[in-house]
Amino acid sequence: MSLLHMESEGNLLVDALREIFLHGVLDTLKIVPFLFLTYLLMEFIEHRAGDKAESFMKRAGVFAPAVGGALGAVPQCGFSAAASNLFAGRIISLGTVVAVFLSTSDEMLPILISGSVPLGTVLLIVLYKALVGIMVGLLADLVLRIMKKPAEAINIDAICDEDNCHCERGIWYSALHHTLTISLFVILVTIGINALVFFVGEETLGSVMSGIPVLSHIIAAIFGLIPNCAASVALTTLCTEGLISAGTMISGLFSSAGVGLLVLFRVNKHVKQNLIVVLILVATGVVFGLLGDLIFPREMFL
């Protein structure tokens, strides 16, 4: 191998690593404002209005998942992370955080629009995800009530590490501290994920997920669990390029909650609850992704 060829390959590798790290940083920076505002709100609730907030959330009752599902449909990256923190603090219910995760589209909307998909089709997909998210969220809370699971008291301190809580220094300092801690955790994982997507390639992923019916939906739903924007970008791009069906894309998008799952496992110490959320996302993705193939035929994207 010539020296010139080796130097060329080295330059390509450097460029690839630069792109991976740059995108990792940029993906994380997009959610930092949402994280900070969420922590600031939670610190305010803890210091100023803990009892009133608890009373208000109890009055919201069975309709909380409907509100979460509607808000989750708004195109942004940070709301799922906010929902994870609110659930960890027991501000919202299990059904509400599930509704948010299922309705969240992450980067789907700009990719579909840039791929010249008809606006009517885009809006139908957004509505479909929101309605399914609301329905599953309401059902999850209903099952918990039938099982007579007692509602846990609001506990914003749950996201504070016992040895690393700075709540006594004021809400601004504490909110900033939590934001930086979570952001560092997210950026490290995001860089690793971006490297996988970059070196494996979207076409390879597409060929794996489009090979066998049903199995492709299961693979897509599991792939969607990747906790950053890369999953929704890859799935939507594969669909717009005709490499996977709309239903397969939707299977992955139902479980693709951006960094929401990453933050959930970081801040919520009840691992069993987190795994239940994951199971609901994957099961919903497979079932309603298969149904999506019937609702959204290929010609709707042309």
Image (cartoon, grey):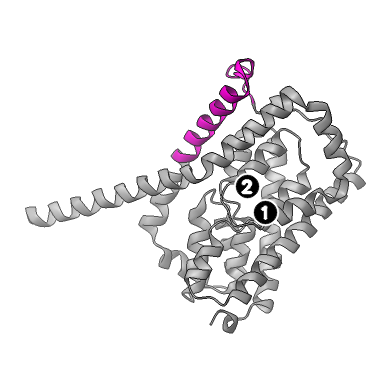
Q: Main secondary structure of the magenta part?
A: helix
The span picked out in magenta is: 160-187
Q: Quadrant of residue 160?
A: top right
Residue in front for this viewpoint, 135 or 208 = 135
From the viewer's perspective, is residue 36 above or below residue 255? above
Label 1: state its secondary structure: helix
Q: Quadrant of residue 39?
A: top right
Instruction: Say whether residue 156 is left or right of residue 201.
Output: right
Q: Which residue is mark 1?
A: 72
Residue 293: x and y, percent? Answer: 65, 76
Circle 1: is it few (<14), some (14-19), or many (20+) Cα within 10 Å? many
Residue in front for this viewpoint, 184 or 150 = 184
Q: Is residue 8 magenta?
A: no
From the viewer's perspective, is residue 136 above or below residue 270? below
Q: CA distance from mark 2 to mark 1?
A: 7 Å
**Residue at (82% x, 30% y) in the render:** 153
Q: Earlier in the sequence, mark 2 or mark 1?
A: 1
Residue 208 visible somewhere in the drawing: no
Label 2: state its secondary structure: helix
Q: Which residue is mark 2?
A: 79
